[in-house]
Amino acid sequence: MAKRRGLLQTILRFVYKMRMRSHHIIPVSDASFVKMMFYRDMGYRLNLENPRTFNEKLQWLKVYNHRPEYTAMVDKAAAKEYVASIIGAEHIIPTLGLWERFEDIDFDALPEKFVLKTTHDSKSVVICTDRKSFDKEAARKLLTASLSRSYYLMYREWPYKNIRPRIIAEEYMVDESGTELKDYKFSCYNGVATDVMLCYDRSSGDTKFYFFDAEWNLLRYNRRGKEAPEGFTVPKPKNMDQMFQIAARLSEGIPYLRVDLYNINGHIYFGELTFFPRSGCDTNLLRETDLLFGSRIKLPEEK
């Protein structure tokens, strides 16, 4: 068994390296690819015929649940229009510019502080807090590399397959901390928001992740939450009830959707929509949480 798993990991490393260098689909079906990836990351075989856990069902949705609107929902530019049409433009962080290439950006037209990111992938983000000391060359390398990369090929997340890669600039925003934006990541199942994961302290290098319910009770769904002392909590933000309502509304008709929101002095802003947290290989969830979340996803009857 150990030898077989070692061989599989070697094959996967080769496949991952190839997909990072190529714009062409590696000749492996999406189903076969996610099975290999899942076994490598989760340590057990993916059952696409009878998925039970949250992570398994996310893989099923990757392979079989393809709806045209999903592309706009994950495109960081198009998603703003999509979300604004449902909850209103007052919840959208202002866009400063949108470009096909890094070389097209007019930095003189941007404010002192801003955020750059690519529209078609994850984590390719550059934050500028002082335009005079901004490292344009480092930003160019990061964003240009991202523009040439297919996020779909990397993880076979279908919603990203047909996004046109671009660079978007947004207003720089911080919450009451003065240094960051706390993330509020809502777990939603077909119009029902069951919980929120609060993420903060990113700049410390030790990001905190805690789950809470709608009444702001700590939920011991992950390792950090399980190890939290009795009575642990953090301040409940203003308008949390409204945040749950917004998240639920954005997820109507969708088997699973994570809705990311920000709360700045009581004003709620849209962050992003995510169909596959950690690409459906979230090892931070406890086993019982993986099963609980999985039980909440009702898969479509038709593939």
Image (cartoon, rainbow, N blue to C red):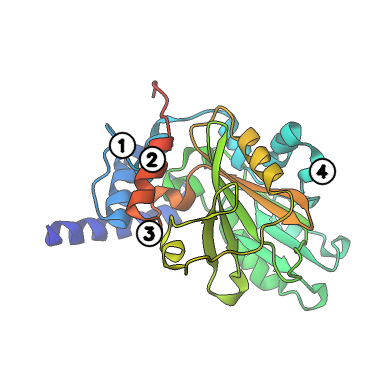
Residue 34, image quadrant? top left
Q: Nearer the viewer, residue 172 or 245?
A: 245
Amino acid carrying label 4: it is Glu
- Give the CA distance from mark 3 to mark 2: 31 Å
Circle 1/circle 2 CB separation < 8 Å: yes
Q: Is residue 77 visible?
A: no
Amino acid carrying label 1: it is Pro
Which residue bears the numbered disc 1? Answer: 51
Crowdedness near tag 1: few (<14), some (14–19) or many (≥20) residues, C-alpha within 10 Å: some
Please state which of the two labelled residues, at mark 3 or mark 1, is closer to the viewer: 1
Horizontal relation, residue 303 to residue 104: left or right: left
Which of marks 1 and 4 precedes in the sequence? 1
Which residue bears the numbered disc 2? Answer: 294
Q: Residue at x 61, y 70 (%)?
A: 201
- Give the CA distance from mark 1 to mark 2: 8 Å
Which of marks 3 and 4 precedes in the sequence? 3
Which of marks 2 and 4 precedes in the sequence? 4
Which of marks 2 and 1 precedes in the sequence? 1
Which mark, by number, is residue 17? 3
Which residue bears the numbered disc 4? Answer: 90
- Give the CA distance from mark 3 to mark 1: 28 Å
Which of marks 2 and 3 precedes in the sequence? 3
Coordinates of residue 27 in the picture (x, y in percent): 33, 41
- Give the CA distance from mark 4 to mark 1: 39 Å
Q: Secondary structure at mark 3?
A: helix
Horizontal relation, residue 35 to residue 73: left or right: left
Is the residue 78 above or below the residue 204 in the image?
above
Q: Residue at x 28, y 49 (%)?
A: 36
Q: Residue at x 77, y 61 (%)?
A: 173
